[in-house]
Image: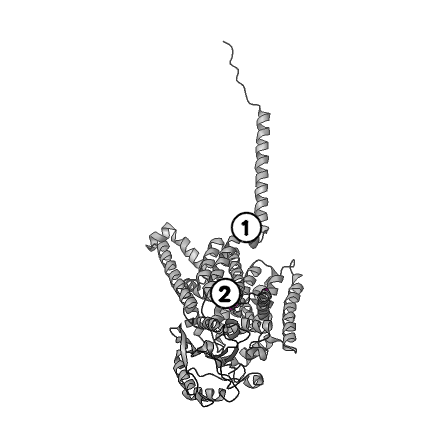
């Protein structure tokens, strides 16, 4: 039998194929490495996957802008929209702060640009004057939220960052304040942006943002005092040391521009941040607006805002985690605790640091609950417990946000809208605002060039003397002080003046006003009595508990206000 021949593979060919396969693998690895390096080199905010979170933030904050129908504090109007109104229409009122140089004009000038655009378009309705600045503010807050998410992604990872963003967006207080034209909200958003820039070692733009924040609200510097060493360390590597002069130049340039703008508006050399620090910190005159215990922020302020979310914060503190964030949090609150005048809104700038900690703790606890050994040892279903706790926290925040955005101190806008509708057919409506100082954004809520207003203005006793030439200061006693009301009406109803078509007041004094005005005699005849023509619930608790009301002269549409007294614009 012939031998069977077996065909063998060519060893040379096999070697060549292996080399080709290896070369292909190497090319793929190099390509993958290049993609990884490219991804690492691409800033977080430029990555497509990150931009969807910005859209979520924008939609969420824009929603809050439309849902807010209540008042919080006078500053949300009288330090922003009412100031912009003056510079747009040349009428209105500037509070004492703007007359003595305590406030910077950069933020109101942004709103002024919006108002001038509305005026040019002929779209300057009272609703537009309210909603457009709020939408602009909501947009800035959304970018702040997104910056917090990017910061947490870089520092803790995207899983923790998602939870931090969730807690930030669903917090009732950030929802309540995020779209309001408060400089505190501006400070919070700019701090978030600066946090992210610092985390990414974008030194020069970070300094620019911090300087802008300082110019708008000088208290913004407080949050950076505990971080001075961390900021300085960014300049230590020799490869970035050359950026220090550029950073200093940018920061000083922003501060100088702010001073130039204020000096131009005030008509003299002015550094508002210096006057602000002197008034609030050195002289302590802000205490005239109320004082609280030195520990008030710890036992009342923070718990009121965070609610159940304070639990992860305490867990982090007890385990001594997040030392960097806690240095900033405790430093900020300690500094503000030394100031006698305290308000819950002053905590807004530090909330992003808190939510960064809360989100990271919550995520890590969730991961711990997935470990079978931990579950077996602790005999607790950690995952289910966390889900129940988060659901309860979410419900509490939703209910609080809806109540405070829709009901608490919600009587001012409805009565202003009522007056707008009723005064449309009156040639020159005359309106009295018999409420606490600056409780009504008079000109933006009742935007009517032909209307004249009477309202109370108040300045601190330490500054009253410096503004008396431009203001008539009167502290309106918000009690049923009949003697005060009698003296006030007698003073206002001297010869050559005008009685009001409408009076805005609270139900605590409405009946007294109706009774006193019904006794007024003009040319031997008694004045037609006033009546309550519109009421709306203002608050269920607090100093302004009760109804906000509009008093109308009977037959107001056909009624020409008798000329009795011309008292100007300030009661």
Question: In the image, what residue occupies the spot 58% across and 35% down?
Answer: 24
For residue 370, side relative to residue 60 (left or right)? left
Task: Answer with the quarter of the image where residue 204 lies.
Answer: bottom right
Residue matched to label 2:
179
Asked if residue 188 is positioned above or below residue 50 in the image, the reply reads below
Residue pushed farthest bottom?
524
**Location of residue 543 in the rendering, given as x and y in whole percent from the top left corner:** 41, 77
Residue pushed farthest left?
379
**Location of residue 271 in the rendering, given as x and y in whole percent from the top left corner:** 62, 75
Task: Answer with the quarter of the image where residue 211 lies.
Answer: bottom right
Q: Which mark is residue 48?
A: 1
Closest to the observer: 175 or 450? 450
Mark 1 neighbour class, 10 Å CA radius: few under 14, some 14 to 19, many 20 or more: few
Res 517 seen here: yes
**Location of residue 347 in the rendering, given as x and y in whole percent from the top left corner:** 48, 69
Q: Is residue 97 magenta?
A: no
Asked if residue 321 is positioned above or below residue 3 in the image, the reply reads below
Question: For the magenta stretch, what is the residue range?
Answer: 121-126
Residue pushed farthest front?
558
Mark count: 2
**Location of residue 245 in the rendering, given as x and y in whole percent from the top left corner:** 67, 65
Marks 2, 1: nearer the viewer: 2
Closest to the observer: 425 or 93? 425
Q: Secondary structure at mark 1?
A: helix
Predominant secondary structure, magenta span? loop
For residue 60, side relative to residue 256 (left or right)? left
């Amino acid at each position: 039998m012939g031998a069977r021949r077996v065909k063998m593979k060519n060893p040379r060919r096999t070697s060549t194929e292996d080399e080709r396969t290896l070369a292909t693998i190497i090319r793929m690895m190099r390509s993958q490495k290049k993609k990884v390096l490219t991804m690492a080199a691409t800033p977080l905010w430029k990555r497509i996957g990150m931009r969807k979170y910005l859209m979520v933030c924008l939609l969420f904050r824009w929603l809050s802008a439309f849902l807010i129908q209540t008042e919080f504090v006078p500053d949300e109007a009288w330090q922003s929209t009412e100031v912009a109104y003056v510079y747009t229409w040349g009428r209105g009122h500037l509070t004492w702060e703007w007359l003595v140089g305590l406030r910077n004009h950069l933020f109101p000038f942004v709103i002024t640009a919006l108002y001038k655009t509305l005026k040019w378009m002929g779209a300057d309705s009272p609703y537009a004057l309210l909603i457009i600045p709020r939408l602009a503010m909501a947009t800035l807050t959304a970018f702040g939220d997104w910056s917090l998410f990017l910061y947490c992604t870089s520092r803790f990872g995207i899983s923790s960052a998602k939870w931090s963003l969730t807690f930030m967006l669903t917090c009732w207080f950030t929802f309540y304040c995020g779209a309001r034209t408060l400089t505190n909200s501006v400070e919070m958003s700019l701090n978030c942006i600066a946090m992210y820039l610092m985390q990414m070692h974008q030194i020069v733009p970070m300094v620019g943002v911090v300087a802008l924040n300082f110019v708008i609200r000088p208290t913004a510097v407080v949050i950076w005092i505990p971080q001075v060493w961390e900021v300085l360390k960014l300049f230590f590597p020799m490869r970035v040391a050359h950026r220090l002069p550029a950073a200093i130049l940018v920061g000083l340039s922003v501060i100088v521009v702010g001073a130039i703008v204020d000096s131009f508006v005030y008509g003299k050399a002015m550094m508002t941040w210096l006057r602000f620090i002197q008034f609030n910190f050195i002289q302590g005159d802000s205490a005239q607006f109320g004082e609280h215990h030195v520990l008030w922020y710890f036992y009342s302020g923070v718990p009121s805002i965070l609610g159940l979310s304070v639990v992860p914060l305490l867990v982090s503190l007890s385990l001594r985690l997040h030392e960097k964030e806690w240095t900033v949090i405790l430093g900020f609150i300690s500094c503000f605790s030394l100031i006698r005048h305290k308000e819950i809104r002053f905590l807004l700038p530090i909330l992003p640091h808190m939510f960064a900690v809360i989100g990271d703790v919550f995520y890590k606890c969730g991961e711990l609950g997935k470990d079978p050994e931990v579950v077996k040892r602790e005999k607790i279903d950690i995952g289910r417990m966390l889900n129940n706790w988060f659901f309860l926290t979410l419900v509490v925040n939703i209910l609080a946000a809806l109540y405070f955005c829709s009901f608490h101190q919600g009587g001012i806008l409805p009565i202003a809208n009522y007056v707008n509708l009723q005064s449309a057919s009156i040639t020159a409506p005359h309106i009295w605002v018999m409420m606490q100082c600056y409780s009504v954004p008079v000109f933006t809520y009742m935007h009517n060039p032909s209307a004249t207003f009477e309202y109370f203005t108040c300045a601190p006793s330490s500054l009253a003397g410096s503004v008396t030439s431009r203001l008539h200061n009167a502290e309106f006693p918000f009690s049923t002080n009949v003697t005060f009301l009698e003296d006030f009406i007698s003073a206002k109803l001297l010869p050559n003046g005008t009685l009001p078509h409408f009076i805005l007041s609270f139900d605590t004094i409405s009946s007294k006003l109706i009774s006193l005005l019904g006794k007024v005699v003009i040319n031997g005849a008694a004045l037609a009595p006033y009546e309550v023509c519109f009421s709306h619930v203002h608050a269920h608790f607090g100093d302004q508990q009760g109804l906000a009301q509009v008093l109308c002269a009977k037959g107001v549409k056909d009624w020409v206000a008798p000329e009795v007294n011309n008292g100007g614009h300030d009661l």
